[in-house]
Amino acid sequence: MDLVGPPSAFVDPSVTIGPGSVIFAGAVVQPDVRIGAQVSVSTAAAIDHDCVIEDFVHLAPGTHLAGNVTIEQGAFLGVGAVAIPGRRVGAWTTVGAGGAVVRDLPSEVVAVGVPARPRPSS
């Protein structure tokens, strides 16, 4: 474990955290979560059991991940984004603020809305 934020964050002892990762105030990280290197878990984010957060991911304030969610390398989840159990967000994908991930998202897309859907490329 590299750096865990202030005492107001809760991180279960079973969580693994890669080097350079930070967990900010009010965040909750539940049992058996794996967090990679250089990950940012922002204020009041919640990560439930058995999630995998790969390297270089940013979870913005208020992000909520249900159990067994995988966030692949470099993904960004905007303020208040959520993912239901068992979903996967592809590498280098952005989920817009308030987006709800109810289906797996592919890599390298920008997904917005409820449910979050990839925006057409321009």
Image (cartoon, rainbow, N blue to C red):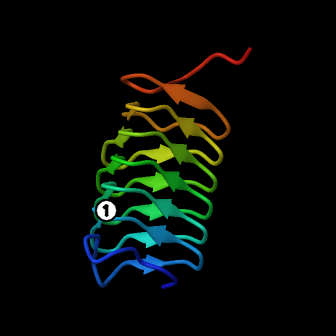
Other-residue count near label 1 (Cα within 10 Å), few / some / many at <14 / 14–19 / ≥20: many
Residue 37 placement (x, y as % from top left): 60, 72
On the image, the x and y values in percent for residue 47 come to 33, 59
Residue placed at 48% from the left, 25% from the top? 112
- Which residue is rendered at x = 28% and y = 77% of the image? 7
Tell me the residue at 59%/80% (across/down).
19
Q: What residue type is labelled 1?
A: Ala
Point out the image quarter for the C terminus: top right
**SS assignment at label 1:** loop
Place of residue 45 in the rendered image (x, y in percent of width and height, measured from the top left): 34, 54
Q: Disc 1 marks which residue?
A: 27
With 16 as the anchor, is 68 left or right in this view? left
Q: In this picture, is 31 found above or below 26?
A: below
The percent position of residue 27, horizontal first and vertical second, equals 31, 62
The quadrant holding residue 39 is bottom right
Residue 54 horizontal side relative to residue 86, left or right: right
Image position of 97 with respect to 31: above or below = above
Q: Would you identify the image quadrant in which residue 92 lies?
A: top right
Relative horizontal placement of residue 13, taking residue 56 as reference (left or right): left
Question: Which residue: 45% across, 71% down?
Answer: 34
Q: Along the line of sight, which residue is nearer the eye, 68 or 39?
A: 39
The total of numbered circles placed on residues is: 1
- Rendering quarter of residue 24: bottom left
